[in-house]
Amino acid sequence: MGPEAHWRAALADGSFLLQRGRQSGRAFFPPRIAEPGTGDETEWFEACGEGTVYSVTIIGQKPPAVPYAVVLVELAEGPRLMSRVEGVAPEAIAIGMAVKARIIREGDAPLLVFDPA
Amino acid sequence: MAEQFPCGKTAIVGLATHGIGEVPGFSSMELAAGAGLKAVADAGLALADIDALFICLPDDLFAGMAFAEYLGLKPRFTDNNRTGGSAFMSHMATAAMMLDAGSIDAALVAYGSNQRSGGGKLSTPAKSNAWEAPYRPLFPLSSYALAAARHCHQFGTTREQLAEIAVAARLWANGNPEAFAKGALSIADCLASRIVSSPLSVRDCCLVTDGAAAIVMTRADRARDLPQPAVPVLGAAAATWWTAISQAPDLTETAARESGARAFAMAGLAPADIDVVQLYDAFTINTLLFLEDLGFCPKGEGGRFVENGGIAPGGHLPVNTNGGGLSCCHPGMYGLMAIVEAARQVRGSAANQIPDVQFALAHGSGGTLSSQATVILGNR
């Protein structure tokens, strides 16, 4: 199984994993077969799930569809990823806001989302 | 070892735009081929003289072969580099080095798209990757919006300042007969336009048009015998730092910082030497980021740089003098249109000709601010 499939299988089992370089200890995302920039071996660890909103955009839609927000989250371990923040109005999502990861199911697949911390 | 480039040893000797705006009933290949024929004729050459092809079409991943067959070329080198809107500046870098090495004698760089007549939407095979798609960003727009939001947060850049860029592009377009979007456009109009992906509104986004462009390059010694004033290529550099915006180490700084610095070093010039600037403005934030990253103003100062008509006609730096992707044309990968406008400014044949242009810069961007490439043209 490649690292991407490994990550998705773990997510389906309720774990949000990250990788880091064995030598550097530097965390990165998305999963890869080697640490980007060095090509070094990697190891898995469980993310703490904490992060902050690094950037946010609200996508306007024609009514009756409602606007929704897409965010970049900077994880406590350093990597950034795209996601959404649930349980809060899009306009209330601000850069710097503390958020916490949660795994939901959407359609047939597990999905990583965030809640205000 | 210092980076080598044959500064001034090669030149653009033919150029053309073709089918700019709306030309129903033509395929992208037909438009690109039309531009190619015009550029070869402009150079005073025959098709049989072209021995290297550099091309990237929106809807044909193997356009290098298809275009060669279409025009009956037999290139000894075909480059199908697909780094989006920066591909054409990369094409020029490769062509200049191969011409100088004597590997090829005459290079044709071409692009064409029927995306307005053919569907009315941005035509691109690119899309959000599997890590981003579930969150439904608009691709590629939301990636640029996330960068813009970050620039506003870090540097206090405002929607009014972004609107200045759209208004400047429109004012230039109003003086260019070829431009597609003309008419009055105020900052208030921009601010009142619908938000698509905040902070970017409809007026922060480029056009969707048809259009094609092409250039012909040869060695400078041969260029002297050709009918048009040669436009020497002084520097050409590319840099790729990521593809997905989530992987950008700093959303407010692009690889243009690297491609620009290297192109300036090749040319032996500095930003203050450049008389006219063409930047791939898929969105207003692009112009802002590239002005900063290329060194025309310090990081974070882009908003103030463009204020009060700073890059509009009569401003302190003429930027996107054809109207840019925002108001002249945007047939997908716009990079080659920026090159043609820069070369026209050096020739002295642009619609909005800037007096006494010695040096011009053209900058292309591909993906989601991912791949950046810079070309510097001019007469030393």
Image: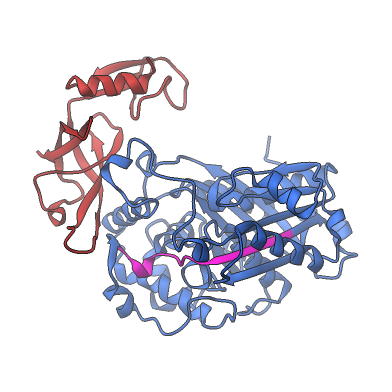
Q: Nearer the viewer, residue A1 or A3?
A: A1
A104 relative position to B143: left or right: left
Q: Is residue B207 magenta?
A: yes
Identity of the residue drawn at 15% across and 45% down: A97
Q: Can residue B84 be seen at all in this image of the molecule?
A: yes
Looking at the image, residue B379 sits to the left or right of residue A29; the answer is right
Please state the horizontal and vertical placement of residue A62, each as a whole percent of the image: 23, 63
Quadrant assignment for the C terminus of chain B: bottom right
Residue A117 lies, in percent from the top left, at 9, 38
Placement of the N terminus of chain B among the 4 image quadrants: top right
Q: Is residue B253 left or right of residue A113?
A: right
Residue A62 appears left or right of B319: left
Residue extent of the magenta highlight: B199-215
Q: Nearer the viewer, residue B380 or A43?
A: A43
The image shows residue B141 at horizontal and vertical percentages of 37, 55
Q: How many marks?
A: 0
Q: Vertically, is B104 above or below A15?
A: below
Q: Is residue B14 visible?
A: no
Looking at the image, which residue sits at the far front?
B25
| Residue sitting at x 77%, y 42% | B77
Picture colour scheme: by chain
Q: Which residue is located at x 24 percent, y 60 percent?
A: A60
Image hue for chain B: blue
Q: Which chain is red?
A: A
Image x and y of residue B25, in percent = 59, 67
Q: Is residue B63 magenta?
A: no
Most extreme residue toward the right is B225
Q: Can you tell which quarter of the image residue B199 is in?
A: bottom left
